[in-house]
Amino acid sequence: MLILIAEDDELILKTIEHKLVKEGYEVILTRNGKDAIETIQNTEVELIITDIMMPFASGIEILSAVKSSGKEIPVIMLSSMGQEEVVLNAFDLGASDFIVKPFSPNELMLRIKRFSVK
């Protein structure tokens, strides 16, 4: 399974990458929303993990790009903003899941496995 990780915090990005690779997943890393959207348009990713607050394009814009493309790609949103309004907005726009930072990499793996068959 090919997973796109869109995260501008290098420590979180590398932590997620390490965990996913260790579990046998292929990953593509992007550090801003613009690169994430370009990757989605040009690559057949099967799952997206994105932070909401990203440079150049937000995680919400990434989610909107996925939905407007017609692709059926699950999107797990990450955010340090756990306000109900942000969470509800993400789900209204079609997010598959939402995780508030800080989070356990093991919790993230459980959520990813709901969407994947390696």
Image (tube, rainbow, N blue to C red):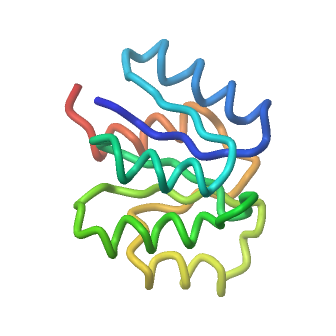
Q: How many marks?
A: 0
Q: Identify the residue shown where x is 27% and y is 41%.
A: 44
x then y, percent, for residue 42: 35, 45
The N terminus - image quarter: top left
Residue situated in front as seen by the camera: 69 or 108: 69
Please state if 78 lies on the left or on the right of 82 as rendered: left
Q: Identify the residue shown where x is 29% and y is 55%.
A: 73
Q: Identify the residue shown where x is 34% and y is 72%.
A: 67
The C terminus - image quarter: top left
Residue 11 sits in quarter: top right
x then y, percent, for residue 41: 36, 53
The correct choice, above or below, for 63 with respect to 22 in the image is below
Please state if 73 lies on the left or on the right of 50 as rendered: left
Q: Identify the residue shown where x is 20% and y is 32%.
A: 117
The correct choice, above or below, for 26 with respect to 50 in the image is above
x then y, percent, for residue 66: 37, 65
Residue situated in front as seen by the camera: 13 or 99: 13
x then y, percent, for residue 94: 38, 75
